[in-house]
Amino acid sequence: MNTLTAGAFLGAALALSGSLKVETIAGYAEFKHGDTLIVEGQRVVTTTATTLKGAKRVADIPLGNEVKAKGQRNTAGILIAQEVDTRPNTNTSTEQQIVASSNDAEQTWVKAGMMFEPADSGKVNKIGDILESGPYVTRARRIMDRIRPSYVPASALRVRAVKTDQWNASAMANGAIWVFTGLMDELSDDELAIVLGHELTHYTHEHMRRQMSKSTVGQIAGTAVAIGISQIKSSTAQQVAAFGGQMGLSALMTSYSREYEDQADRVGLRYVYEAGFDPTKGPGLWQKFKDKYGETDKITNFFTGDHSRPTERIHNLQRQIQLNYTKPLPPKKT
C-alpha cells in the first residue's frame, strides 16, 4: 500500500483531526504522480490506515479503473483517503447500444457533409458544414491529443470542426467530438483546451451511459415507428429522425445533468493542467460566455441542460483552482 512520508503523514493526521468534512469522490484512475492518484480531477493519497479494496496498493490500480475514494482533505487540498474501492471499468450492453446509435448518427452527418437536425414537416435545419481538415481541425486535434489521458488511445477519438458562427462544442458516446468554428475564433489555446477537456470528460466518464436508462436506449432504436418516419420524404431527414425521434438528436449528444456537467468541469481542468495548458483561464472563459449569453440563455450541449449558471460555474472553477492548481504548470506535452 502506498503510504505518506512521516512528515506528510503527520500533516495529514492533523488535518484529519480537525473539523474538515468527509468527502466521497468517484471517477476513474487517470494519472499517477508518485504516491498520488488522480481521481475525478482530485489528488488522492493513502495512509497505512486506509482500507483498500480491489487492489493491494495504489500503485497496482490500472489507469482507467473505476475508483471511489472517501476521506478528508488536508490543507494542501489533497484527499487523504480513509477508504479506496476500485474495480475494472466494464462495457455494458446498454453502453454498446448507445455507441452503436451514436455511430449511426455520426455517419449520417459525415455522409451529408454537414451537421443538421430534424425540423418540422420532414425538413432539416443545417447547423454547419463539417470540416475534416484545415487549420481549425488541425488545431482542435492537436489540443485534444495533448489533453487525452494515456489510457485513451488517439484512435478512439474523432475530432471535427463545424463551420458556423455559433459558440458550441459537444461529444458523443462513441468518441466523436465536434467543435464549432465560431467558438474557436474567440478562444485562446488554453481556453479551447478547457472546452475540449470538458467534452472529453463526457466521453471518458461515460456520462451518456450513466444518464440513460435501458428503456430510454431502446427508444432510440424504435422511434421510427413512433414518429411515422415513412411520411418523411427526404431520405436524409428519415435517417436523422430515426436516430433522434421523440428525443431529438440531443439524446445522443445529450444535455447532461448538473452533476455530470460539474464533473466535466472539474475533470476537464485536470486534463488541461496535465497537458501543460493553463487551468486558471477557466473563470475568464466562463465570463466570456456570461458576457455573450447572460445567466439564463441555454445553448445546445456544452451549455444546456441542468447546468450551473455561469456565475456559479466561475465560482466552482475558482475553488478547483485553489484546491488543485496553485503550483506552476507541468512541462507541456508535445
Image (cartoon, grey):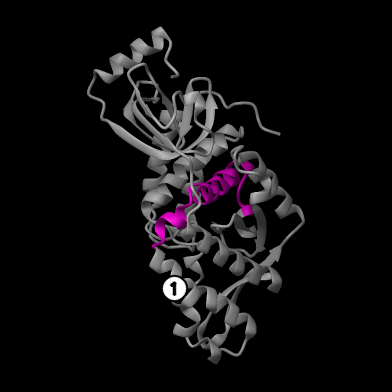
Residue at point 61% right, 40% down? 147
Q: Main secondary structure of the magenta part?
A: helix
Quadrant of the image for the N terminus?
top left
Q: Is residue 90 above or below residue 302?
A: above
Position of the C terminus, as image quadrant, is top right
Judge left or right: residue 86 versus residue 148: left
Q: Is residue 185 visible?
A: no
Residue at 67% x, 58% y is: 160
Other-residue count near label 1 (Cα within 10 Å), few / some / many at <14 / 14–19 / ≥20: some
Task: Report the side of 231 relative to 39 (left or right).
Answer: right
Disc 1: which residue: 219
**Residue at figure coordinates x 38%, y 41% from the top left:** 315
Residue in the foreground of this view, choosing between 334 and 165: 334
The residue located at (68%, 49%) in the rendering is: 155
Please identify the residue farthest to the left as the structure is shown: 19
Question: Where is residue 269 shown, x and y percent of the image?
Answer: 50, 39
Residues rendered magenta in the picture: 184-213
